[in-house]
Image (cartoon, rainbow, N blue to C red):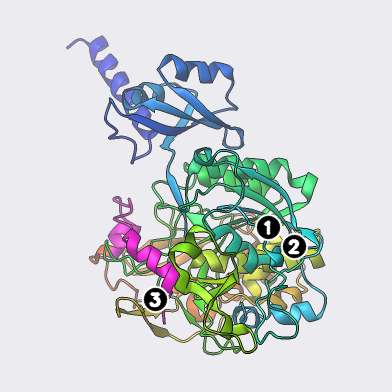
Amino acid sequence: MTRKAALLLILTAALAFCADRKIAPDLAAMPADKQVDVIVRYTSHPTALHHQRIERRGGVMRRSLEVVNGASYSIRGAAIRDLADDPEVEYITPDRAVKATLDFAEPAINANIAKQYGYDGTGVTVAVIDSGIMDSHPDLMTSVSRVVHAENFNTTVGNDYFDRYGHGTHVSGILGGDASKSSGSGYTRTFLGIAPNVKFVNLRVLDGNGSGSDSMVIAAIQRAIALKSTYNIKIINLSLGRPVMESYTQDPLCQAVEQAWKAGIVVVVAAGNEGRNNTKSTGGYGTITSPGNDPYVITVGAMKDMKTLTRGDDQMASYSSKGPTLFDQVAKPDLVAPGNKIISALPAGLALTNTYPANKVPLSYYVSNGNSQGSDYYFELSGTSMATPMVSGAAALLLQKQPGLTPDQVKAKLMKTATKSFPTSSVSTDPVTGAVYTVYYDLFTVGAGYLDVWAALNNSDTISSKVALSPLVQYSSTTKKVTLTNGTNVVWGDTNMAANVVWGSQVLLANNVVWGDNVVWGDTTVAGFNVVWGDNVVWGDSTPTGETSAVAIYGEK
């Protein structure tokens, strides 16, 4: 072989390697003859010329996604590798599927005290990106609907922006229901949301079965940013997610939430319901879902309020996803809130209420002399999807009190003031299967602690303008210890926001050490560390769909 030929061979191999790195792992093996929906991110804002290049390869543009310098397309598998050779293409992913993942809960997080002092979310608007909102529910109206804007981004349901599934309405009730259908004489219990006077922007991305796609969510985030000034959107609630398939720096869904955060919008995301997933022998660790794996956003795990008014007996839900995140090893969740067996606003006649009528709240539970008939106004659901609007509501109360707070300052206050008193472990039982799960209260399970709304509102710390990125963690195979690492210009380095203050001594042990010699996975030979810190970090099988659905409907004991 001549020297010129050898150099050409090396160059060809190098270009092929670069192209391979631009293709998401779950897209690389796509059959050449299969039509696939993809999201293409470019090195700069795409123009008509970029779209024409796709069309020349037989592709069809679906939607512009300027917020991530990209667009979604339908294209044949055979063209993907060729497309990756384009130097202006940054990364290509499948347009992945996403799914939707308070009588006792409100006192459990001290939100009831906040209302006694006039904090109800007045002046704050929350964008709920979900299955839509049925704003005809009386709890979501104050003479007129509190939904000030509504749009649909799910191309499978036409222009219908109303909730046909039920998830988005339930989430909205937790966040801002005013309990008008459970207040006054004749009612023994009241189901009041955390911020009962917020306004909503309804951005529907999930269909009547609770399913959508990355591009739909990204388009909705993009719209929320555009409408921020028009409606004073301060918060985005994302009670949805999907498995992590690459670093957050490459994931278009993560990049979209970062843009919202940088635009001044607090983004609150569900951690996921994969905490029982042991397919890789991790005991449920390393199962945080996207975009909850992004270090900017507030990622929320689920607690059980145990149907009591006191916080002292509350426990973690075993299904709540645990950190650290795959690929990047970000310490998540950021904090936890009630999410198990949560009662909230939901009208009859939707997919969830029709399929699971037993989850309608019996009238006898909250109506004087009520019978056992299921309510047409209230429904019970479980999961981190329900815990997320608890935190969104708390953020709304903070922003009502201090409208000038940045997203990073809101995140820092909520995390620092979260309750950090936990047992070492607790035991949970699945009510359907009878399976028993033990939960350990470490940093990757409870984050910075249990949401405390009243403590956050009373926090007077002056927080710098630094970012509040969730820290990375590193594992040393020599010392067998995991430590937190903070980047430069991060708020946790401030005197009043030191790492051990935010996360607490119970979970940080000493000198920012997360776990000492008694590490959760025990030894480096155990599969758990190989999955989370090793080279082969692609998620295993997710929790079976049936079990995930059962969590939402039945919760746990």
Q: Between residue 523 and residue 389, name the one nearer to us.
A: 389
Identity of the amino acid at label 3?
Gly
Position of 51 with respect to 466 (left or right) is left
- Viewer-nearest residue: 465 or 196: 196
- Residue 95 on the magenta segment: no
Badge nearest the viewer, 3 or 2: 2
- Horizontal arrangement in the rendering, residue 7 relative to residue 129 (left or right): left
Q: In this view, does 514 lie above or below 5?
A: below
- Tell me where residue 513 appears, x and y as whole percent: 46, 72
**Left or right of residue 189, residue 270 in this image:** left
Mark 1 vs 3: CB contact within 8 A: no
Between residue 495 and residue 53, name the one nearer to us: 53
Q: Which residue is drawn at 27% across and 62% down?
A: 279
User: Dots 1 and 2: beta carbons under 8 Å?
Assistant: yes
Q: Identify the residue under disc 1.
A: 135
Circle 3 crowding by C-alpha within 10 Å: few under 14, some 14–19, many from 20: some
**Under tag 1, what secondary structure?**
loop
Please state the extent of the stretch shown in magenta in the rendering: 528-557
Residue ID at (29%, 73%): 522
Describe the element under mark 3 as helix, strand or loop.
loop
Q: To which residue does mark 2 refer? A: 141
Give the total number of marks visible in the rendering.
3
Disc 1 or 2, which lies upstream in sequence? 1
Looking at the image, tell me whether mark 1 or mark 3 is earlier in sequence order: 1
Mark 2 residue type: Met
Residue 303, image x and y in percent?
51, 76
Is disc 2 placed on a helix, strand or loop? strand
Residue 519: percent from left, percent from top: 34, 74
Q: In which quarter of the image is the C terminus?
A: bottom left
Foreground: 525 or 253?
A: 253
Q: Circle 3 is placed at which residue position?
A: 516
